[in-house]
Amino acid sequence: MAALQGLAWLLLCQSAGEAIARLAQLRLPGPVLGMLLLIALLQWPRVRGPIGAAAEVLLAHLSLLFVPVGVGVMTHLGLLSQYGLRLLLAITLSTWIGLAVTAGLLRALLRRSAPAPARTRP
């Protein structure tokens, strides 16, 4: 029952984000606004529990979410053979750029949070 409540919270947040984006005519996508709303709601323990239960169910069946993607790839093999090398290059470069930015940000944050070195007196 908690997992169903968690799924309801997830759908409610996404729908609310979509409604806010459309009503306010924002350029920000509705699911992004819904995710921000979800982050705010996760501070509340009454919401955190059911969403955690829903997350466990979704993660347990994560492999099923890749079936539509696999079917889509199989139906568009012609496009894949035509643009495959460009796609591979774009995916590889974007992955490496994402890793480099994440590593740089982590190093900066670790440097910033590290305690100052102790000074020795002469």
Image (cartoon, rainbow, N blue to C red):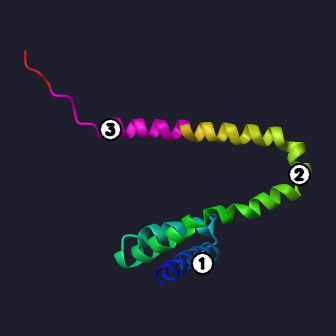
Badge 3 crowding class, 10 Å Cα cut-off, few under 14, some 14 to 19, many 20 or more, is few
Task: Please provide the residue range marked out in magenta.
Answer: 100-118
Location of residue 91 with respect to 66 vertically, above or below: above
Marks 1 and 2, how far apart in space?
34 Å
Q: Earlier in the sequence, mark 1 or mark 2?
A: 1
Which one is nearer the viewer's eye here, 65 or 116?
65
Residue with the mark numbered 2 = 77
Which mark is on residue 112? 3
Relative to 122, 4 lies left or right: right
The alpha-carbon separation of the residues under discs 2 and 3 comes to: 48 Å
Whether the magenta-drawn stretch holds residue 104 is answered as: yes
Q: Is residue 109 visible?
A: yes
Asked whether residue 33 appears in the rendered view, the answer is: no
Looking at the rendering, which quadrant does residue 82 occupy? Answer: top right
> Which amino acid, mark 2?
Leu
Image x and y of residue 29, in percent: 63, 65
> Which image quarter is the C terminus in?
top left
